[in-house]
Image (cartoon, rainbow, N blue to C red):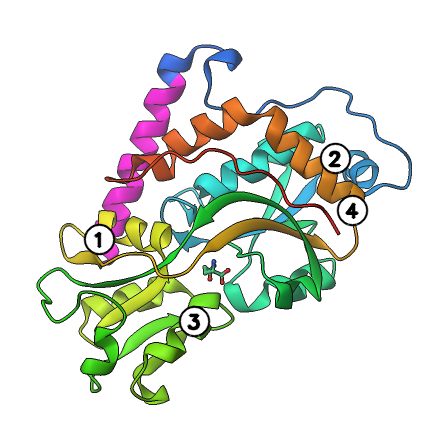
Amino acid sequence: MRSTRIKAAGAAILLSMSLVACGGGDDEGGDAEVVEDAEFEAGTTMAEIADAGTIKVGTKFDQPGFGLLNLEDEPEGFDVEVAKIIAGALGISEGDIEWSEATSDIREQVIEDGAVDMVVATYTINDERKQRITFAGPYYEAGQMIMTLADNDAYEGPEDIAENPDDKVCSVTGSTPAVNIEEYLASPDQLVLFDIYDKCADALANGQVDVVTTDNVILAGFVSESDGEFKLVGEQFTEEPYGIGIAKGDVEFCEFINETLKENEDRYNEAWEETAGQVEGSEAPTLPEAEACS
Ligand code: GLU
């Protein structure tokens, strides 16, 4: 698995080089706009971040298409580009973003601790999480699916998990799919949890687990990297609207993020095409209507 992933990362680098080469100018795409001399009302999070000249962003480092560390140790993917759009509106260029890995189980914690200014990390908006943090967005609508080895004919959807009670299903601690899948299990022993999805993909390739479950777009990224080894199975069976996690109650920052995404819809569309849109069978999203900030 490692070698195919490294090859895929190499291909992505070549691709981004060619995009730069034929881009030629800022207005031809490839980069989020960086606002010069951005000014904000004193005391707001926007003013604090703009004054600091840097923004701390939590994202995923193992998810092809959304947030994946490349060979230069820089994250790339749709979430990473969404974060760059927001940073740019605060006057911060991508070289001044401080990235850290926000695995599923630590996302609320790093926001509460102030270790990051925002989390953009395939992060489903839900009421439980809203008790601890505020979400801007949604900026994308995903849905949970299952993935198996391409030659496994035992699965048509999550209902078949209980039909195969000796099989193991892999997901990630602190994720919504790990909870949503419980009702489909014959027994809790079927569920194997890691901290990142990359480990589930390796466990599937090694035959240690039979099914991996999480959001369709995350699984599609692993399928596209697998050289025909993995496949997506059936239909999506949940709704996972992705939000941007920020400190609880920071309504001004939340509204600023929503307005920024709306104003930068062209860049949002381009960013999709350059990242997750490269995955075979992917469908270009339309920026969803934002929820009210609270
Ligand atoms: N969107 C789901 C969640 O927020 C699954 C993806 C993830 O774990 O990042 O839990």
Which amino acid lies under the numbered mark 2 shown in the image of this protein? Gly
| C-alpha distance separating marks 2 and 4 | 21 Å
Please indicate, yes or no, whether residue 152 appears anywhere in the rendered image.
yes
Residue extending farthest to the right is 42
Q: Which residue is mark 2?
A: 53
| C-alpha distance separating marks 1 and 3 | 32 Å
| Figure quadrant of the N terminus | bottom left
Residue found 37% across the figure and 40% down from its top: 276
Segment colored magenta: 1-20
Q: Main secondary structure of the magenta part?
A: helix
* Between 64 and 17, the one nearer to me in the picture: 64
Element under disc 1: helix
Element under disc 2: loop
Please indicate, yes or no, whether residue 209 appears anywhere in the rendered image.
no
Answer yes or no: do the residues labelled 3 and 4 have beta carbons within 8 Å?
no
Q: Which residue is mark 1?
A: 3
